Amino acid sequence: MKKRTLIVFAIFLSASVFLFNSFYKESKSIAIAKLNGEQMIHAKQAARGIEGFFEMWTRSLTYLSNIDQIVDIDTAGKRYLELFYDVNQDQIMSITRLDERGVIIYNFPSTSSLGIDISDQKHVRQLLQVHKPVISDVFKPLRDSIAMHVPIFRGGVFKGSIGVLINFESLTRRYFDAIKIGKTGYAWVVSRDGTQLYSPVPGHTGKSVFENARDFPSVIVMVNDMLKGHSGVTTYLFDRVGAREAKEARKYAVYMPVKVGDTFWSIVVATSEEDVFAGLVSVRKKLLVVICVLFIFGTVFSTLAAKGWFIVKEVEGRRKAEQRYHQLFEDASEGIVLLNDRGSIEAANESFVKRHGYTKEEIANMSFKDLATPETFKVFAEMNPRVLAGETLRFEAEQYHKGGHIVSFEVVLDLMRDDDGKRIVAFYRDVTERKQAESDKAQLRHELAHLAGVMAMNEISTSLAHEINQPLGAILNNASAAKLLVSRATDTPDDISEILADIIQDAKRAGDVIRKIRGMMANEEALFEPLDMNALIEETEKLFRNAVSMQNVSISLVLQPDLARVKGDRVRLQQVLVNLITNALESMQKKTTKILTIRSKMQAPGEVTVSISDSGIGINAAKKDDVFKPFYTTKKEGLGMGLRICKSIIEEHGGRIWAENNPDAGATFSFSLKTLPGESA
Amino acid sequence: MSIANAVIYIVEDDASFRKSMERLVRASGFEVAAFESADAFLKHPDIRRPACLLLDVQLPDIDGLELQQKLRERSSSLPIIFMTGHGTIPMSVQAMKKGAIDFLPKPFAAQDLHSAILKALERDVENRKQEIQVSKIQSLVATLTPREKEVLRWVITGKLNKQIAAALGTTEKTIKVHRSRIMHKTKVTSVAELVRLAEKVNIPAAI
């Protein structure tokens, strides 16, 4: 989105810059053309003015040259010239009469130069040669001036000339100074040989332009064309603007020849670029404003348009994503519920609703508190602020099903933050079954533990009873025999009979006590039912999963399929398996290789044999016959009852149990049980 | 035959208890023969006089129940009284089913032992009478020819001579002759007596 905006922005920016540039260029060239047109007019005016000026002076001097008194330069002639000077003294500085050799024969107002030969002066030399009106370059004796001479003939004979020294300042003031274009536009003039007749740059007037513009080739190029008598339009670079020093700047110039006598000057009117641009500034400003406005509108419009397009796309995308998420939400096997910060249900998925037995409509008006047991709600209430602070928490929840029973869940609480504020999303995993399985397992373990205890007590009491009953029986027998013998004898003290009677009575009492204990212990009757030993083995193995994986024991079940069922007490036979597996695991505790194999097979017809093999320390060969005896143990904390109990149980089932060492390592304990009648595989 | 000259066998591995048993039984007026194992007892020659066996259930070689089984296999009718240090119910049921007279959990009263012995000896006397009778009958049956034995099996079915003759493919008269010879040889006067006699020596009826 951002990238796209940038691209659109860039496109509009470059379009605007291009537009601005072309408009500006166009305006600039228009401005330049307009400037040059204006300059040309100025130049032409100046040129025509000067041409007219000199024509006027030529006519005036020609008139004078035809006056005899002036040809003769007599008193009257001198008087004419004085008058002429007086009338024109604002324009001329002096009036001079040269003879045919170029010697001053009259000069007014100054008379000091009389008799001076000025034939060496360029224009005079020209005059003497061509006998035509001549105009000098600009002199700088005192003030800038130009000399103009018209030849004098008498009877077709050259008799010298009549000339005036024209005040060039007045001329320039009149024709050139008037040329002002903008702040920097002005005129300058070169003579036929490149002498600068007029220049606003101080010190340039009277010097060769080639000298003055030595460092500016573009000026020289223009001047060369000017000196061919051409007119034209060009640009050049120069570092002066009139009298002031300036940065080297481009100047737009027009130039044209000015016909002066039989030669010509050339006038240049030039204006600095800055003036051109100065004229353009307002245009540029307006243009810039227009372009900017266009640009802004364009950008805004296209951004809006793009935004709109993106929004449409995004809305579409979001709708699809929403649909997908909604699907995910609804189809999730986990229950998912969205709670607001007060614990009210905002949304619940199918799974959640189903697991609680409600409908969506019913659940929509409920809150967490309505569903949770008080204990669970307490936990939730404690967790609530922490979850709202951003923690992800997990707990076990018990919730009421609509039917009233309790369902167990593992719940993960997570924070969901969006524009509308904070919500809690809770994921419910139904663990009722797992809990049930756990409790079943626990129940089974409990039963087994109880049985193990009972069996152990039973075995202990049985063994004790046997050990005690034997001597007690002997005592009783002996006492009874003695009593019989005594009763037949004649002279035996009465005390003996009494003693014997007491012995008999106490022995009987002791026997009764033991019998009572035995009776108390033996109250757990075996419950015989058809059993699948494979299923029993698998079920029992599960009880050891944790222990087995913790101790790195690899356990394998090699069970014969279609094993015939046996008649047995489920719990007691499981006790046998538990005892044998426990022993096997313990025997491998210090071994690196820990392999436990439980096998079932039909070893003989009508007989199922189960064997538990380990890779443990094995059985001490010398004690091989003792392992099933009561109080036989190799463990520090052992009672020595485990195997004894196994033997009792198996024998109670009419089966056999035996132990043997494996050829490689460890021991195998096996028992066999009769199959159910009619079942033989 | 009377229990006066009876002999009481005791098989008990616990020496001390065995000795006390010997004393008590002897004091009660019986003759005693005690053995420490089943094996030793089995090697003892069978004396044809009233007797009973006081047998410990737990014995080192073969246990009491197995010895009982072995004696049955030998067709011995010797009555057995079991003694046990920790008699279990299934074990006692099994023993009683197989014909044990009693099951005495140690320690037991002299009186209980005495009445069990008397009961056993009575049983033994009875058994021996039966045995004598059976052996007498057997010796009588032994005098019958194979053909007469066959006819006997038919006669005890209660069938008529004519039917028996048809079954055996002979004449009614022949059967009649066989029948009278059988009655004579076995010293009976009625078919009913003949049936009882056949039962005692396990002669099955023909059908």
Image (cartoon, coloured by chain):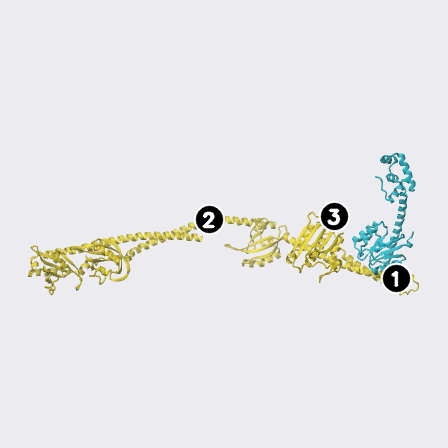
Chain colours: A yellow, B cyan
| Amino acid residing under circle 1 | Ala
Mark 2 and mark 1 in contact? Answer it, CB < 8 Å.
Answer: no
Give the structural element (helix, strand or loop) at label 3: loop
Eye-nearest disc, 3 or 1: 3
Residue A482 numbered tag: 1
Chain letter for the residue marked with disc 2 in the picture:
A
Where is residue A334 shown, x and y percent of the image?
A: 58, 51
Mark in the foreground, 2 or 3: 3
| Chain where mark 1 sits | A
Q: Is residue B156 left or right of residue A666?
A: right
Q: Which of the two discs, 2 and 1, sits closer to the camera? A: 1
Q: Amino acid at mark 3?
A: Gly
Q: Report the amino acid beneath label 2.
A: Lys
Choose top left, top right, bottom left or bottom right for residue B165.
top right
Looking at the image, can residue A473 be seen? no
Q: Are marks 2 and 3 in contact (CB under 8 Å)?
A: no
Query: Quick one: label 2 or label 3, which is nearer the N terminus?
Result: 2
Q: Are marks 3 and 1 on the same chain?
A: yes
Q: Which residue is mark 3?
A: A606
Label 2 sits on residue: A313
- Label 3 crowd (10 A; few <14 / some 14-19 / many >=20): many
| Image position of B97 (left or right of A128) | right
In three-dimensional space, the C-alpha distance between marks 3 and 1, rounded to whole angstroms, equals 53 Å
Q: Residue furthest right?
A: A490
Which residue: 10% across, 56% down? A63
Looking at the image, tell me whether mark 2 or mark 1 is earlier in sequence order: 2
How would you rate the neighbour count of disc 2 (Cα within 10 Å): few for under 14, some for 14-19, many for 20 or more?
few
Q: Tell me residue A201's x, y (percent).
A: 23, 61
First in sequence, mark 3 or 1: give its number: 1
In the displayed image of the protein, which residue is found farthest to the front? Answer: A663
